[in-house]
Image (cartoon, helix red, strand yellow):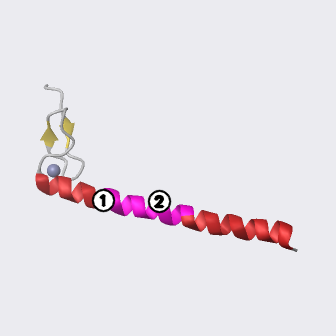
Amino acid sequence: MEPHKHCHICGTSIPTEENLCSEKCKDEYDKLLKKRRNRVYLIYALMAVFLALVLFQMYGG
Ligand SMILES: [Zn+2]
């Protein structure tokens, strides 16, 4: 069996030097990454707010 990988989007077998099988899947993957990155920023923002509130409670009273 030839060494191969699978497209991250649709699961098609692809050469090992590739990550995705087509331009369409590359577009989809870009969208997915952007969405994921936005969510990470959102989580960081929420954590910062939470930390600020905790610090405020500890030192503000
Ligand atoms: Zn694909």
Magenta region includes residue 34: yes
**Quadrant hosting residue 13:** top left
Q: Main secondary structure of the magenta part?
A: helix
Query: Residue 22 has which mark?
Result: none
Q: Is residue 61 above or below residue 39?
A: below
**Image-quadrant location for residue 24:** bottom left
Residue kind at label 2, given as amino acid type: Val
* Image x and y of residue 32, in percent: 30, 59
Q: Secondary structure at mark 2?
A: helix
In the rendered image, residue 56, in percent from the top left (x then y), is placed at 78, 70
Look at mark 2 in the image and give the residue it sits on.
40
* CA distance separating discs 1 and 2: 12 Å
Q: Residues within 10 Å of mark 2 (few under 14, many from 20)?
A: few
40 displayed left or right of 11: right
Q: Quadrant of the C terminus?
A: bottom right
Q: Give 33 or 16, whichever is nearer the viewer.
A: 33
**Magenta part of the protein: which range?**
33-44
Of helix, strand and loop, which one carries label 1? helix
Left or right: where 59 falls relative to 10: right
Residue drawn 53% across and 63% down?
A: 43
Q: Quadrant of the N terminus?
A: top left
The residue that disc 1 covers is 32
| Image vertical order of residue 54 relative to residue 17, above or below | below
- Number of residue marks: 2
Indicate which disc, 1 or 2, sits on the residue closer to the N terminus: 1
Question: Amino acid under label 1?
Answer: Leu
Most foreground residue, 51 or 3 = 51
